[in-house]
Image (tube, helix red, strand yellow):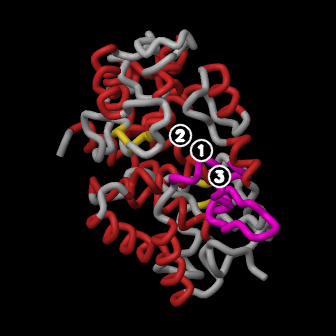
Amino acid sequence: MNTNLSSFFIFIAVFGLLGVCHGQLRMHFYEESCPHAEEIVKEIIWNRVARNSTLPAKFLRMHFHDCFVRGCDASVLIDSTPNNLAEKAAIPNLSLGGFDIIDEVKTELEKTCPGVVSCADIVTLAARDSVSYQFQRPIWDVLTGRRDGIISRKSEALANIPSPFFNFTTLKQSFANKSLSVHDLVVLSGGHTIGVGHCNFFSNRLYNFTGKNDENDEDPSLNSNYAAFLKTQCKSLSNKVTIVPMDPGSPLSFDNHYFKILKQNKGLFQSDAALLTNSEATYNVNELLNSQNFFTEFAQSIMRMGAIQVLTGNSGEIRKKCSVVNP
């Protein structure tokens, strides 16, 4: 095994033994109420990822989009109704995937421990377990004890989920609104090491970038050779269908390669390139070129993200079905 990863797993083992807790979240929350809960989640997620290597990126994104709207309360899973357009209907969430597998996990847990395990914890565990499949062991700890929210609004998703078009100032504020630092912003951007981007979220960097009506008007912060390649994939500003890897070197491997391509000005989105426009963020990017630093820091930042505005104790509910608020 890579020595960086070996050291990282030692860190995780020690970190996990510290009895970490954040507010009312804690390790092994379901130890007595549903002792096999985490194993059931992992088994289903690993079985699915073994057959579909695109799932880790989908679950990581689902977790991120959930936590940035009303906190990590599984509000992103709720379906719209005739009287309410839910978060799922917002443009940033139209390309989310994996809901069917979350439902599969929930169904199995309801058979084993009815009304005990929250959908919010399932989403959080699914993100960790799907990414960890590559390493065949958990690469960060998940504190559990979240409860499910009962409100989901399309408008709130649009207002809270960071846009791929954001500049650094707007990105920083978006993360600060969730009590996350510039360091967390840079580290969590490393999640772009897996997954894909749709042309319409970055093709403005390829064509008419400054509004001169010039097809050669590219974003000057984008590597010109990379821009030429992207133009072969996204042939117009109107293309909303084509997808390209966010990390062209290793799109299915969770690693620190994102930061290496970022330094080559090959970040796909404006929000990626924005990290190099601020000295503090650039310093963090350089630190994360070290693989061990990335794995260690990602584990801590995603745990902080997973604690945003969580509902615990008697707040919220434990949904019986993840897509519908309890009657």
Coordinates of residue 157 in the picture (x, y in percent): 69, 48
SS type, badge 2:
helix
SS type, badge 1:
helix
Residue span colored magenta: 69-95
Which quadrant of the view contains residue 75? bottom right
Coordinates of residue 208 in the picture (x, y in percent): 50, 17
SS type, badge 3:
strand
Disc 2: which residue: 301
Coordinates of residue 215 in the picture (x, y in percent): 43, 16
Name the disc covering residue 22, or none: 3
Disc 1: which residue: 304
Residue at image position (59%, 69%) is: 29
**54 left or right, relative to 215:** left
**252 left or right, relative to 269:** left
Q: Nearer the viewer, mark 3 or mark 1?
A: 1
Residue 13 visible somewhere in the drawing: no
Quarter of the image where the C terminus is located: bottom right
Residue 12 visible somewhere in the drawing: yes
Q: Distance between the residues labelled 2 and 3?
A: 13 Å
Residue at image position (46%, 28%) is: 203
Query: Mark 1 touching mark 2, by CB under 8 A?
Result: yes
Q: Distance between the residues labelled 1 and 2?
A: 5 Å
In this rendering, the answer to whether 117 lies above or below 127 is below
Q: Which of marks 2 and 3 is in front?
A: 2
* Residue situated furthest bottom in the rendering: 111
Amino acid type at image mark 3:
His
Amino acid type at image mark 1:
Arg
